[in-house]
Image (tube, helix red, strand yellow):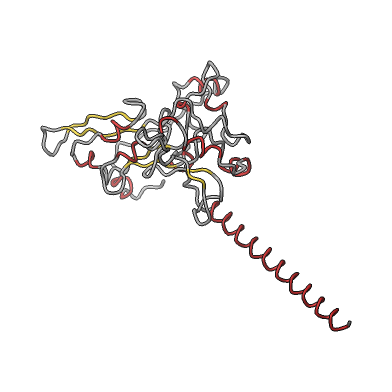
Amino acid sequence: MMANSDNNRRKFMATTLQSVGLTALGGLLWSGYSHEVKASPLVLRPPGAIKEDDFLSACIKCGLCAEACQNRETNIDKETGKAREGTLIMAKGGDAKLIGTPYFIPTQVPCFMCEDIPCVPVCPSGALDFASLANEKQALDINKARMGLAVVHKESCIAFWGIQCDACYRACPLLDEAITLEYTQNERTGKHAYLLPVVHDNICTGCGLCEQACVTEKPAIFVLPREVSMGRAGDHYVKGWDKKDQERVKDAKSQETTTEISKESAADYLNSGGEY
């Protein structure tokens, strides 16, 4: 009897230790993935995604948005009747995104700007915000999406070399709005012009169609989350012509300044030996 009792006690202790060990290992793995997410801010989410920290808390990882994206009508192969690869990917272990949350990679499959935005209405948790994409008629408007912002790397963009290329411009679904071409004279030749792509942040949706269309080996135009790609001037700068700024400073008292710009060059000033 004593022997059986000892064996049962050993088995119980061994099972308990195994369970504790597995739990601890699971916790370590999950904390590792969570840390990886926090250290990887370059994640593009579906249209209507709320602020990233709130998104990670709100998303229940159901995959309904990715399923809706996969099965949208525009994504069905007419010959086979089967769905092509969808834009949205559900993150798996090691993806550097929180497991089970949706994201997309423009160079693989960009967002095709579906007018009905099928991924948003199916979201049950509010992680994809319907209201942020609603127009005046309270209908979904994909042009209001702000998934990211396209950024041009001038050194690798061949348009800045003088080679005429408008691939990103032509691929943009908001033609001549989100991306425009700036005509600048090529002073080296005196006969040719540069056609330089300019991205307008108040219109760009971050769909990534321009990134996929770029002809360079590694895209010279790429989409980044807006929090990463955009600067912030701060409240102490005032445009003057902006109505919001005018409203903000309407009661402020103006102050005269007596600062004069020196006619000396910077080098003369620094070498003058005077006090400053």
* Nearer to us in this view, 64 or 48: 64
Q: Which residue lies at the image location 45% right of the left edge and 23% below the top edge?
A: 240
Give the side of residue 208 with respect to residue 216, left or right: right
The relative height of residue 268 versus residue 149 in the rendered view (above or below) is: below
Query: What residue occupies the far front of the structure in this picture?
Result: 80
Give the side of residue 88 with respect to residue 181, left or right: right
* Nearer to us in this view, 35 or 9: 9
Give the side of residue 160 with respect to residue 26, left or right: left
On the image, the x and y values in percent for residue 8 come to 81, 76
Q: Which residue lies at the image location 11% right of the left edge and 34% below the top edge?
A: 190
On the image, the x and y values in percent for residue 272 come to 32, 48
On the image, the x and y values in percent for residue 58 come to 63, 40
Query: What residue occupies the far top of the structure in this picture?
Result: 137
Q: Which residue lies at the image location 26% right of the left edge and 35% below the top edge?
A: 167
Query: What residue occupies the far right of the structure in this picture?
Result: 1
The relative height of residue 255 versus residue 56 in the rendered view (above or below) is: above
Query: What residue occupies the far bottom of the structure in this picture?
Result: 3
When asked about the image quadrant of residue 160, the answer is top left
On the image, the x and y values in percent for residue 244 come to 52, 22
Give the side of residue 60 with respect to residue 4, left or right: left
When asked about the image quadrant of residue 49, the answer is top right
* Nearer to us in this view, 115 or 170: 115
Image quadrant where one finds the N terminus: bottom right
When asked about the image quadrant of residue 127, the answer is top right
